[in-house]
Image (cartoon, coloured by chain):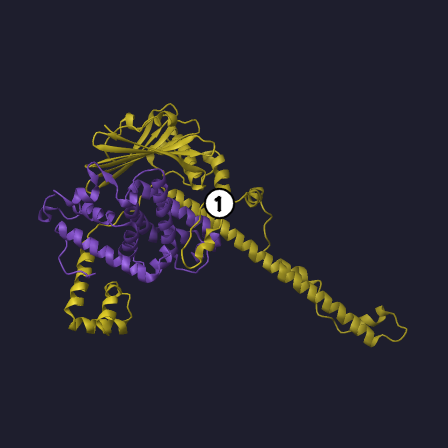
Amino acid sequence: MNHDAARDRLLELAYGELGSAESRRVEAHLRTCPQCRAELEAISATRTAMRRLPPERAPEAGERVLLAAGREAAARMGEARRRSSASAWLRLAATAALVVAVGGTSWRILVARRERPAEAPIDVALPAAPAPPRSVPEVPRLAEAAPWPQAPSPEAERRGAAPPADRGVPRLAARGEGRAEAAADASFAARAKVAAARPAAAAPSLAAPPSTAATRASPGAAAAEGAAREVDLLRAGGNLSLADEQRRRCGDAEVRMEVWRDRAGRARRLVVTSSDRSGSRRADLLYDAGGRLRLARVEAEDGGGGVSRGRIAFDSSGSRVLEEGAGPAWPDAELPRGAEAGMVSPPCPP
Amino acid sequence: MRRFRQGDPGAFETLVSRHRAAVHGFLVRAVGDRARAEDLTQEAWLRVVSAAPRWEERARFRTWLFAVARNLAVDDARRRSIRGQALPLDGPPGPDGPRAEAAAADDPPPDSLAEGALLRPKLEAAIAALPAEQREVFLLREYADVPFAEIAAITGAPEPTVKSRMRYALEQLRRQLSEIGLAPVAAGRSR
């Protein structure tokens, strides 16, 4: 392998993408080429240094909603699959019935023609004919053996009738996987809407709150969790969108606020992030349909990557009814009780 | 993904537990903002859920997932630039300017740095200072372990271009690391 060819493969060698034969050829060249050796060492040294960056921890917030959405989608897809399988069996059964019926009739006619004396009625000849393939009576059994689809529930019908939701879907460049760019799953969005419209207690399948002692003990906290869950469901169903973003300076800190609105235009979520040299603070504030703050998911990060997370729940009058998780204090000034009032200007951290 | 499509709820949980941290890590470093990355991570997974019924096994799931995440990051950057905000992919602004500059200058020598805590912002700043198209290639190859050919599929760039971006990214990182005393010197590829 000549110098240029070997040099072009150093990157793949460093990342283990070469086959063993080609690796051996490049390595043979490296033994005789100090320039390529130096280049490979530079790649390796840079990689080693960059690998000292600690991995990011996945945020816990949102995982429950996500897993619940996955479970619901799996249930729907499983049901669709069973239905599809059942209808395939039905088609097969119907085809078999038709074939058997036609075959049996043809056989009868054939036998009748063969054995019928010139003047004898067909009925007389039939008992003498060999038994035709057991046909019509067998068909129901064949059909019964197949799984029978359940009649669609009214809710399933509603889902089927829902218009496609206008949500973006993944695209994969260059190889035509863009087919997946079709409109997003309308049934998921519709189901999330239906679930969101139910009272919290009737929709336990999505994002049930953690059964903390505090939550169980306090009806106010449970109500707050229910209201927050409704916002999560709106978001999971694509019915909450980022409507505005504001920034301001508070001394050394930069504070950013996102306003998320539901389809009725009500602010249901504010995300306030402030950061300065010493770290960052983030409050994810969820509001009920009346614009009252019900749950704050708070997170503080020190400059070294240490993160503390917590939750603060509020009753409908704005009093704190639950505080969970360690971390710095979150004064009321940082947790605007009314969504619209909070949008006037991002609050400054203390 | 096949099992998830067949209605196995555990399969989705497996996908999430296997890939969620990697996607989140990619997005944090691609958009340079943890809060935005958290939202985009959630968005990416919700898109996986909604697209699952139409999923066709034409690429590795992980490749497709990173394509989703990468497209979200690109769209997010575009939205922000339209709104007239600084492009987050060019590095989040700090009180005294871009984090890359803040981290590169006037800081204590590396000997005195505690491993991890103080190193992290410097390495993140070095990544944030990369041009966006080099940064995404570096992040996908180095931390997400996506092969070059699949990065080409994800980004829509030809594979030789992807490798070229990777070389430039590594060279720039090496220069930055050596400026702050974190990387051994070795001659880079001359151009």
Residue sitting at x 26%, y 30%: A330
Comparing A248 with A330, the one in front is A248
Q: Colour of chain A?
A: yellow
Q: Is residue A101 visible?
A: yes
Comparing B189 with B114, the one in front is B189
Residue sitting at x 48%, y 33%: A199
Residue sitting at x 23%, y 33%: A253
Q: Which chain letter goes with mark 1?
A: A
Q: Secondary structure at mark 1?
A: helix
The residue positioned farthest toward the right in the image shown? A119
User: Residue A223: percent from the left, percent from the top?
Assistant: 41, 30
User: Residue A61: percent from the left, percent from the top?
Assistant: 34, 41
In the rendered structure, which amino acid carries the disc numbered 1?
Phe
Image quadrant where one finds the N terminus of chain B = bottom left
Q: Is residue A52 above or below residue A303?
A: below
Q: Colour of chain B?
A: purple
- Crowding at label 1, few (<14), some or many (≥20) Cα neighbours within 10 Å? many
Comparing B131 with B28, the one in front is B131
User: Residue A313: percent from the left, percent from the top?
Assistant: 34, 30
* Residue linked to disc 1: A188
Residue sitting at x 67%, y 62%: A139
Q: Is residue B188 left or right of residue B57?
A: left
